[in-house]
Amino acid sequence: MKPASRVETLQLEGAFSVLQKARALEAQGRHIIHLEIGEPDFDTPPHVIEAGKAALDGGWTHYGPTLGYEDFRQAIAAHVAETRGVPVESGEVCVVPGGKPMIFFPILALVEPGDEVILPNPSFPTYASAVRFAGATPVSIPLVEANDFSFDMQRLRDSITPRTKLLILNSPANPTGGIIPDADIAEIARLAHQHDFFVFSDEIYSRMYFDAKPRSVISEPGMKERTILLDGFSKTYAMTGWRLGYGVMPPIIVDAMQKLLVNAVSCTASMVQRAGLAALTGDQGAVDTMMAEFRERRQLFAGMLNEIPGVKCRMPNGAFYAFPNITETGYTSEDLAHRLLNEAGVAALAGTAFGEYGEGYLRFSYANSRENLAEAARRMRAWIEANPRR
C-alpha cells in the first residue's frame, strides 16, 4: 500500500523541518537562536483572549455557519472596505480555519489541469503545492533583488499565455519582506483585464509595513470582480495557534468555497470567531506596539547582517523577515543554513526552501528579542570569518 500519487505533488514547509532539527540539538544541550519560524513572538492581545474565554463560557462551542457568523463576516467586510477602499458585502466573505485553506480551496475551485498559474519565486511553498495538487502548472517568476524583490514586469508580461488562469501576489512578502510598488500593482491589474485572468492576493501581512502602505490589487478599478484576497489574524494579532483567516472574493467563488469547506472542515471554530471579532473591532494598541518593536529589530538586525563579510541585506519593507544575499560567502544557501544551525547555533532557512530562485539567500525571522538577534548576527559573523570559502 502507498499513498495516492497526488500526495507526491505536495511539499513540506522548511521552517518546521528546521525547527524539528533545532529542537533535537537543544535536547542535546545546545543553545539555539530560533530565527526560522514565521511567528510573532508576542502574546495574543489580552482583550482577544478574554473574548475567547467569554465565548467558551457563553456556549459558543457548537457548529457554526460554514462561511462564518454573519456579524463577523460583516465586520470583516467593513474592515476590508475601509482599508482597501472598495465596497464589500458580507456575502463576499469566507471565514476559514487559518490562512492555508484560503490558499488551497480557491485554487482548487478555480484552476484545472492544463491551466497555468503565475507565482513569485521565492515565495510561500504552499502556493506551488496547491497549484500542482489541482493539476495545473506553476509558472515561476523570479523576484528581483534590485527591485526590492518585486517582479521584473517584462518577464511577467512575457510569461502570460492563453492558458494563464491565475496570478498569485504576496505583498508584503514572505520570505523577502518586499512590497510591490503601486505602479506595478496598476500594471498587473491592466494585464489581468487584458488577458482575462484572476489574481490571488495574499495579504496576510497587510498591517505589517514600515513606510508607505502597500496597495492592494483589489483597490484597482474593476479588480474586485477578478480578485481573491486572503488576510487573517495569525500575524497581525499574534494568533497563529487560533487558526483564523478569511477571504474576499466574487460570489461565484464563494459558492465553490462553501462546497469545499463543508466537505473538508465543516466550519471555523465558533469561539475562535468571537475572539477574531474582538481583535478586529477592539483596541489596536497591541498591533501598534508590536510593529514599533519590529521596526527597531529590523534596523538592528539588517544593519548587523550588512557588517558580515560576504553578506548583503536590503532593508525589508514589510512583514518580519530579513532575506540577505550570501552569494559572496562562497556557500550555497542550504550548506550555509545547515552549518549555521549545527555549528553556530543559529536556525535560519535556506532561500531554496521557497523556490529555486531563492538560491544565494537565507531567510531570517526577526520575531525574536533584540538581544538574541544581535547574538545571532555575532555568531554568524564569527563563523563565516572562521570558515572562509571565497
Image (cartoon, rainbow, N blue to C red):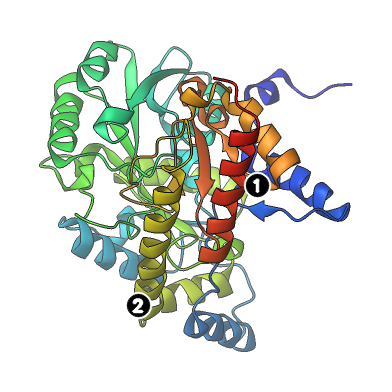
Judge whether residue 267 can be spotted in this image. no
Q: How many marks?
A: 2
Q: Which mark is residue 284?
A: 2
Identified at 21% across, 16% down, the residue is 157
Which x, y percent locates residue 48? 49, 80
Measured along the vertical axis of the image, is residue 135 above or below residue 229?
above
Measured along the vertical axis of the image, is residue 291 above or below residue 320?
below
Which x, y percent locates residue 101? 53, 46
Asked if marks 2 and 1 touch (Cβ < 8 Å), the reply is no
Q: Amino acid at mark 1?
A: Val
Q: Nearer the viewer, residue 177 or 312?
A: 312
Find disc 1 in the rendering and name its residue.
Answer: 346
Measured along the vertical axis of the image, is residue 31 above or below residue 336?
below
Relative horizontal placement of residue 82, taking residue 106 as reference (left or right): left
Which x, y percent locates residue 192? 20, 27
Q: Amino acid at mark 2?
A: Gln
Q: Residues within 10 Å of mark 1 (few under 14, many from 20)?
A: many
The quarter of the picture where residue 196 lies is: top left
Q: Earlier in the sequence, mark 2 or mark 1?
A: 2
Judge whether residue 119 can be spotted in this image. yes
Q: CA distance from mark 2 to mark 1?
A: 33 Å
Relative horizontal placement of residue 55, taking residue 175 as reference (left or right): right
Q: Nearer the viewer, residue 144 or 95?
A: 144
Q: Residue furthest front?
A: 386
